[in-house]
Amino acid sequence: MPELPEVEVVRAGLQPAIVGARIADIDIYDERSLRRHDRALGTFVHLLRGSRVTAAVRRGKFLWFPLETGADERPRALVGHLGMSGQMLLREPGTLDERTRIGLSLEHPEHRDLRVNFVDQRIFGSLAIDTLVPTRDGFPSGFAGDIPPAALIPSQVAHIARDPLDPHFDEPAFFEALSRKKVGIKRVLLDQTVVSGIGNIYADESLWAARLHFERQAAALTRRQAAVLLDEVRTVLQKALAEGGTSFDAQYVNVNGASGYFSHSLNAYGQTGKPCARCGTPIERVSFMNRGSHFCPFCQKRPRAARKPAEASAARTADKA
C-alpha cells in the first residue's frame, strides 16, 4: 500500500496541474470507486463539475483538494485515497488508461488542458467529496507545498494523526502516546491515529535503523530510544521521498507513470535471506498482522518476554560469553 513518500510524490506531481484548475467534466466508469462519497451531500458529479481547485494537501496517506465555494456554502474538498493500487495519472485530454475508474477533465487558466485518470486495479482506493471541518489543534491541516493550507480538514480524515514530516507534528504527545502503549512498537507505528503515513515498508526500515525489534513494547522504550526511533523514521521517509518512493511492481507509479527507486535502498523490508548491511546476519521474515515483518535477528534483539525458551537460553549463554 502506498505510504507517505509515495502519496507525497503524487501530491507534488499533481499540484502544478490541478491547483487553480477548473474541473470541467467528470467521467464515472466504476461507481465502486465512489463508495466513500457521502451521497447525502449531493451527487459526486454535481458537486464537482465546474469547481475550481485551490490547493493540493496531504496528511499521512490521504490526499485532498479544497474546492472554491461560495461565502454561504460549507467548505468542501475532493478527497483521494489510493488504497493498495490506486493511481492518479496526468494525461492529455481524451486519454483513457486501462482500469480507469474516474476521469477528471481540467481547464487551467495558465497551463494547457489536462486530464486526471484515477486508475485502480483492486478498487480499494476511492474519490469522494467531503465537508471540511476545523483541525483539532488549530494549525494548518497538512502539507501543501510552499503555501500552508487552511486549518480545515476533510471530516473523514479528521481522526488521522499528523505525520512525522508535518511541521506541526507534536513530538511530546507522540512520546506520551508511546509510554501508554503496552503493545509491540510496530503496531503503534502502523496506528494512523497515533502517527500517520507509516506502513509496513517504512516501519520495518525505521526499526532496523533504530536497532529495535518490532515486538519491543512501546511503553518499555526509554525516551532516548523513542527519540532515536522518531529521528530514524524521519530519515527513512525523507530518503524514500527523495528517491520517488518504493516500487516493487506496476501498482505504484507517479503522476507520469514512472516508478520510484527506493527499493534499491531497502535494508530490511523484502530482504529475506540477504546479509544485514550492518552485521552480515541474514535478514529474517516472520508473519505479522496478515503481513510480514523483516528484521535482523542480531541487530534487533527480540525482547526477552517474547523469546521462546530455546532462544532465551541461547541469549543467556551469549550474554555470559
Image (spheres, rainbow, N blue to C red):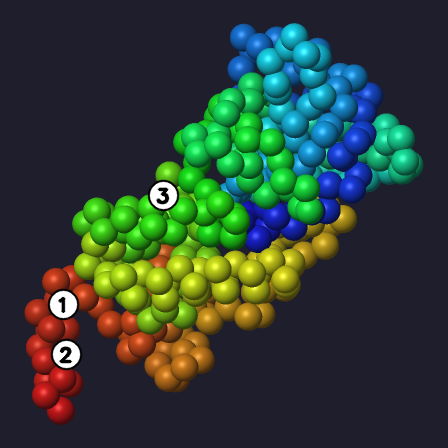
Q: State the residue position of label 2.
A: 315
Quadrant of the snapshot with the C terminus: bottom left
Q: Residues within 10 Å of mark 1 (few under 14, many from 20)?
A: few
Q: State the residue position of label 1.
A: 304
- The label on residue 194 is 3
Measured from the top left, where is residue 298 in percent x and y? 29, 78
Check the image and report above or below for 292 versus 138.
below
Residue at image location 43% in from the left, 65% down from the top: 232
- Foreground residue, 44 or 230? 230
The residue at the far bottom in this view is: 321
* Corner quadrant of residue 78: top right
Residue at image location 33% in from the left, 46% down from the top: 173
- The label on residue 122 is none
Q: Amino acid at mark 2?
A: Ala
Disc tally is 3
Residue at image location 36% in from the left, 66% down from the top: 228
Is label 1 in contact with label 2 (beta carbons under 8 Å)?
yes
- Foreground residue, 73 or 18? 73
* Residue 178 visible in this rendered orientation of the protein: yes
In this picture, residue 177 sits left or right of residue 158 = left
